[in-house]
Amino acid sequence: MTSASRFLPVSTSTPAISAKSKEEKKLLKELTGKFFSTIDELDHATKVKSTQEVEKYYAETKSVLDEVIAVRIM
């Protein structure tokens, strides 16, 4: 696994995001940062082969991604 932040472009100029309010854009930006942070932690946990950390960061990543999707759908 490699850091997704290096491969997944995140743009706030897409039509779905540009139509959001200023507060929603700010929230999406914060959640996106948190998402990529948890992906990096998950990557590290995978490299050190820590099952406990993998499970923890997988759950955190899923939770943040669910939040991002919920905001984008609103």
Image (spheres, rainbow, N blue to C red):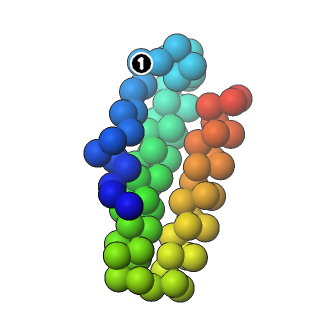
**Element at badge 1?**
loop
Q: Please say if 36 is above or below 60.
A: above
Specify the amino acid type for callout 1.
Ser
Badge 1 is on which residue? 13
- Judging depth in this view, the residue of 2 and 59 nearest the camera is 2
Residue positioned 61% across, 67% down in the render:
59
Quarter occupied by the N terminus: bottom left
Location of residue 60 (image quadrant) = bottom right
Q: Please say if 3 is above or below 71.
A: below
Q: Please say if 36 is above or below 73.
A: below
Left or right? Give the position of 5 relative to 55: left
Q: Can residue 60 be seen at all in this image of the molecule?
A: yes
Residue positioned 47% across, 53% down in the render:
35
Q: Residue 64 location in percent, x, y?
A: 57, 54
Badge 1, how many Cα within 10 Å: few under 14, some, many 20+? few
Q: Can residue 41 be seen at all in this image of the molecule?
A: no
Location of residue 61 (image quadrant) = bottom right
Residue positioned 48% across, 80% down in the render:
53
Q: Residue 9 location in percent, x, y?
A: 36, 33
Location of residue 46 (image quadrant) = bottom left
